[in-house]
C-alpha cells in the first residue's frame, strides 16, 4: 500500500501531529481511487523487480539499455517508475530478461 506513515515510528507520528501536521496516506492525500492506488503499486513493483533482476544478472543500466535497444537514461527512468514509462514497457523489459511474471489474484 502507498502508506509510508505505517512505517513511521509512533513517537515521530505523535510529535508531528502535536506540531499541527496531518499524517495520512498517499491515497488520502492525492484522493486516489482503489484502482488508481493498485495501478501505482503495480508499476512501482514492476520497476523494483526490473532493477533487482538487472542487478542479479550483473548488468549495468547501459548493458540493459543495449539489450532493450534503448538508452541508459531510459532504463534509469524505468527503474524509477517515471510517469513517462508505461507498465507495458516494464513488462516487456522483464520478459526480455527472462523473468516469469505472475498475475496477482
Image (cartoon, rainbow, N blue to C red):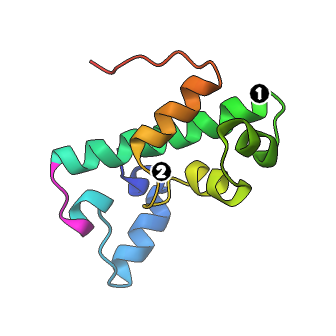
Residue 16 sits above or below residue 57 on the image: below
Q: Foreground mark, 1 or 2?
A: 1
Front position in the image: 16 or 44 = 44
Q: Nearer the viewer, residue 55 or 18?
A: 55
- Magenta residues? 29-33
Q: Is residue 17 magenta?
A: no
**Residue depicted at 28% across the width and 42% down the height:** 38
Q: Position of residue 105 (x, y in %)?
A: 26, 18
Q: Residue at x 32, y 84 (%)?
A: 20
Majority secondary structure in the magenta region: loop
Picture quadrant of residue 10:
bottom left
Residue 43 lies, in percent from the top left, at 42, 44
Q: Is residue 25 visible?
A: no
Q: Secondary structure at mark 2?
A: helix
Judging depth in this view, the residue of 1 and 93 nearest the camera is 93
Residue at horizontal 40%, vertical 57%?
A: 5
Q: Which residue, given by chain and number where applicable, does mark 2 sit on?
A: 7
Residue 70 horizontal side relative to residue 86, left or right? right
Q: CB under 8 Å between callouts 1 and 2?
A: no
As drawn, the residue found furthest toward the bottom would be 19
The vertical placement of 40 against 25, above or below, is above
Circle on res. 56? 1
Amino acid at each position: 500500500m502507498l502508506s509510508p506513515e505505517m512505517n513511521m515510528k509512533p513517537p515521530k507520528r505523535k510529535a508531528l501531529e502535536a506540531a499541527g501536521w496531518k499524517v495520512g496516506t498517499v491515497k488520502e492525500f492525492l484522493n486516489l481511487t482503489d484502482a488508481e492506488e493498485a495501478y501505482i503499486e503495480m508499476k512501482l513493483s514492476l520497476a523494483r523487480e526490473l532493477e533487482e533482476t538487472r542487478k542479479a544478472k550483473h548488468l549495468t543500466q547501459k548493458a540493459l539499455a543495449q539489450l532493450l535497444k534503448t538508452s541508459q537514461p531510459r532504463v534509469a527512468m524505468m527503474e524509477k517508475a517515471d510517469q513517462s514509462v508505461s507498465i507495458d514497457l516494464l513488462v516487456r523489459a522483464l520478459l526480455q530478461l527472462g523473468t516469469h511474471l505472475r498475475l496477482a489474484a
